[in-house]
Amino acid sequence: MIERFRENKEITILILILTFAAALLRLYHIDFNSLWLDEGSTYWISTQSFGTIWDGMLHGEFNPPLFYWITHIVLQILGHTEFALRLVPAIAGILTIPAVYILGKEVMDEKAGIIAAVFMLMSPWHVIYSQEARTYTLTMLVFVIACIYFFRWYKEPTTSNAAAVG
């Protein structure tokens, strides 16, 4: 692993810079806009107990509970603020940048991965969704990770790669 880092030191530093830039873009004025109806719904659901969140998913809420459980924990740790409510989507949006690089590298090559990461970094929609207290960016991050493992399995169909896709 360390040898691989030394060989690709410039690429690693570039991806770290892109990830840092994504953090700046996604965290800048994260609490500037007031909450809107769907974010209020996220807040209300996230303040419930883990069991109540699970029951809500079974009886009406169509989003999976993981986002709400993570947001619940963040609200307990950081307090009930707009920043804390929007932090989970922001972190997921930030982590999507290196994940998109890895996906581009798996599908094509390092150059394609860098280009894809830059496009994701600069996407105004991704920045906006990273600042909303909704599941969009976490869903995208999980989907990109699933695609990474799918392409790894496609290239090398082993049991461990198949399990990672699952």
Image (spheres, grey):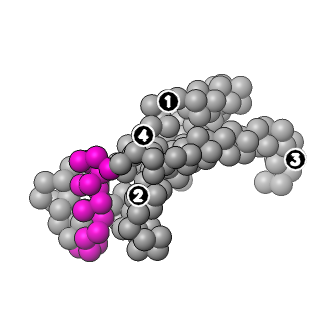
Q: CA distance from mark 1 to mark 3?
A: 33 Å
The amino acid on which the numbered mark 4 sits, given as a three-letter code, is: Tyr
Q: Are marks 1 and 3 in contact (CB under 8 Å)?
A: no
**Amino acid beneath label 3:** Arg
Instruction: Say if 46 sits above or below 100 in the image.
Output: below
Of the two numbered discs 3 and 2 on the same chain, state the one appearing first in sequence: 3
User: Which of pointers 3 and 4 indicates the residue nearer the eye?
Assistant: 4
Q: Amino acid at mark 1?
A: Pro
Q: Is residue 42 magenta?
A: yes
Instruction: Residue at 62% x, 45% y: name it.
Output: 24
Query: Could you tell me residue 151's position as x and y percent?
Result: 53, 36
Q: Look at mark 3 in the image and give the residue it sits on.
A: 6
Gap between marks 2 and 1 measured at Cα: 21 Å
In x, y percent, where is residue 131?
Answer: 45, 45
| Residue 16 in view, yes or no | yes
Q: Quadrant of the N terminus?
A: bottom right
Q: Residue at x 58, y 29 (%)?
A: 122
Q: Nearer the viewer, residue 90 or 158?
A: 90
Q: Residues within 10 Å of mark 1 (few under 14, many from 20)?
A: few
In the image, which is nearer the foreground, mark 3 or mark 2? 2
Q: How many marks?
A: 4
Q: Residues within 10 Å of mark 3 (few under 14, many from 20)?
A: few
